Image (cartoon, coloured by chain):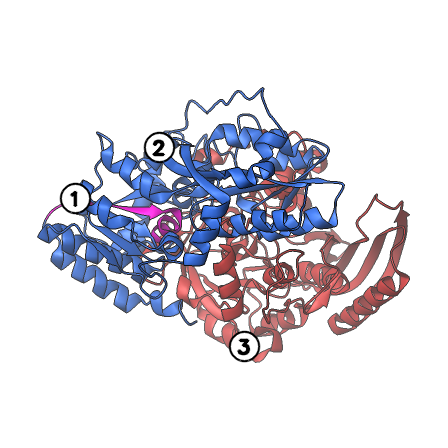
Amino acid sequence: MSDGSGESAAGTGMDDWCCPMPLRDYPSIVLGHGGGGLLSGELVEHLFLPAFRNPALERLGDSSVVQVGAQRLAFSTDSFVVRPLFFPGGSIGDLAVNGTVNDIAMSGAAPLYLSAGFIVEEGFPVDSLGLIAEHMSRAAAAAGVAIVTGDTKVVEKGHGDGLYINTSGFGIVPDDVNIGPSRAVAGDTIIVSGTIGDHGMAIMSVREGLEFQAAITSDTAALNGMVQSMLNCCRDIHVLRDPTRGGVASTLNEIARASNVGMLLQEDRIPVSPDVQAACEILGLDPLLVANEGKLVAIVPSDAAEAMLQTMQNHPLGRHAAIIGEVTASHQKLVAAITSIGATRVITPAIGEQLPRIC
Amino acid sequence: MKYLTEFRDGVRARQLATEIRRLTTRPWAIMEVCGGQTHSIIRHGIDQILPADIQLIHGPGCPVCVTPLDVIDKALAIAARPDVTFCSFGDMLRVPGSSQDLFSIRAGGGDVRIVYSPLDAVRIARQEPDRQVVFFAIGFETTAPANAMAIKMAKQQNLTNFSALVSHVLVPPAIDSIMAAPDNRVQAFLAAGHVCSVMGFWQYPDLCRKHHVPIIITGFEPLDILDGIRRAVAQLETGQTEVENAYARVVTHDGNIPAQQTLQQVFTVTDRAWRGIGVIPNSGWKLSEAYHDFDAEQRFPVSDICPCESSQCRSGDVLRGTIKPNECSAFGTECTPRTPLGATMVSSEGACAAYFNYGRFPDVEGMRTEATA
């Protein structure tokens, strides 16, 4: 759908994977169906897309772009179920605003208005709800958007897990901007806006039973300001995506598939903070598959890449931006990387939930 | 980062590869025992920079992969009980039993929880006295000490609602079994460094002598593995069959004595079935007589188990090192991490999953040549 998890990510580009597969494995929904990886993609492709099919939905971008009169609107919705509600670097309130703002911004649109829906469990502390609303207000002000409509439902104790939030929003896409997941072409440059995996590991560091001492904070932030600077640098940005659940690996695989191109990354150019790298090593996780909430992947024409990198590095949210690879005409639908020792590997998308390893 | 980036240095890696190439005069088959090493080899592409004469055979050292199907089926049956809170390490949850996995049990209402330490399961038992907490104690000598400690603490705390489903396995008997197999092709071993950090390597000289095989205690980073291979090739080329410790920053000869003492108290050696391989004598641990009361198999007898392996899955051949994962006809088609036919496709340390996750499809080889050109 429009939440960054919804693309049909067959990933490895094997030809016989291209035909739709039935949802054959699980008669019930499992957690992995919400993990932003292959299982999520299948749910969208085989259940929701057939039910709702229309041209705007079929593009499967972070937000949908629809024509309203003379203007193109970027429209998106996202639901937030994060646990714990407060974590290092933010809260569910920050995520609820920034997540939808970012989905809209990935179309090159300037986000304008948001809605907010709250599903609250009976017994939830009003103080906590107040604090979360305050965080949402602060995040909206920082992003330059207004929350103009909302809804509250209370469910009986035991029928919800504290608090869930849904936000929707829209913005206007400038006439001369055409950003979409299928626009990557061979020769383009792939830029990531900073260190990856910060949000996912920040959440994991405070998850019950896994508390580890690490100075990792979530990167949750609204990216629309940086996107405006980037558009001022180059109007012809081909693809923008915020690699949330499923991480950079899943996002790049989705783009490679949508654009029918290959990608070649330089693994040692991918920015990862030492704390995130260490935590991932301990748990056996790959930072490329870990969620981000304040980063974007940009695919731009190679002749604009250096100027774009400078623009991003000059922005507070892009200080650690880096060129990590290029789009190729070869190995279509595959994302490959040159490893630190000079060999190659293929980077596959997430399947479902990442599972910490046993030893 | 300290202890990480310096062991992934590309220049030093290529120097070691050059040294290995210089030493190698004929074909050699070397088995890395541990799934963590397999994962590192495939992730970093270490095999791609070795001379063609060096063949790496991926060993059975993935605890998730070798846990037998009947134990998985027992775990599923116990986890489905309404009175049980079933605690497991995360990567066991997607391992297929005969008909479903622990994720499906959870989706069906079972109380299945991922824990990151066995002590968390003990804490849950203490905090929720009305629940029967069962911990899935699997793994090699690496995970066994913490599991033993958890069971010991449960006994000290007189927790009557805690038990463990134990299926521990041991590395040295597996090496012995692989070398004794009539179709064995392994000529040298990279032993699992983390296992040796617990157990030391005093058990290995006997194996070297018995089977005339060099055993190199090896770490997990690219330079560790390349150094292990270099030492193995040097011995093979000169006809030596010694134990060498190439992971001295972690491993000592005697290992972790307090851990070994705890293991001896809580566990006793037993014959153990390895998934895909079969029963290996004296290759596992079960609960000792003193801890018999904490045995989940006794507390929750499961009788109507009818383990049924996929007829297509060749994980046994993969675990014995007789085929590479991508030589199995189901690899990447019927069998993927999303639809695994066997445990080797599930665990991040399983050889099949490593081949899949890092794109070792037969039809990708052309791409690889092109990318590195």
Tell me the mark number nearer the camera, choosing from 1 and 3.
Answer: 1
Q: Which chain is blue?
A: B
**In which quadrant of the rendered view does residue B207 lie?**
top left
- In the rendered structure, the answer to whether residue B254 lies left or right of residue B290 reads left
The answer to whether residue B304 of the structure is visible from this angle is yes
Mark 2 surroundings within 10 Å by alpha-carbon count, few (fewer than 14), some (14 through 19), many (20 or more): some
Q: Which chain is red?
A: A
- Give the residue number, with chain letter if any, for mark 2: B281
Image position of B313 with respect to A351: above or below:
above
- Give the residue number, with chain letter if any, for mark 1: B212
Depth check: give the residue in front, B256 or B238. B256
The residue marked by circle 2 belongs to what chain? B
Residue located 56% across and 80% down the image: A314
Residue located 34% across and 52% down the image: B41
- In the rendered structure, the answer to whether residue B260 lies left or right of residue A80 reads left
Depth check: give the residue in front, A33 or A251. A33
Identified by mark 2, the residue type is Pro
| Residue B29 lies within the magenta run | yes
CB of mark 1 within 8 Å of CB of mark 3?
no
Depth check: give the residue in front, B92 or A354. B92
- Give the residue number, with chain letter if any, for mark 3: A313
Secondary structure found at label 2: strand
Residue located 39% across and 63% down the image: A266
**In which quadrant of the rendered view does residue B277 lie?**
top left
| Residue A294 percent across, percent down from the top left | 63, 66
| Residue A325 percent across, percent down from the top left | 43, 62
Tell me the mark number nearer the camera, choosing from 1 and 2.
Answer: 2
User: Do circles 2 and 3 both sit on a common chain?
Assistant: no
Identified by mark 1, the residue type is His
Secondary structure found at label 1: loop
Q: Residue A3 carries which label?
A: none
Mark 3 surroundings within 10 Å by alpha-carbon count, few (fewer than 14), some (14 through 19), many (20 or more): some
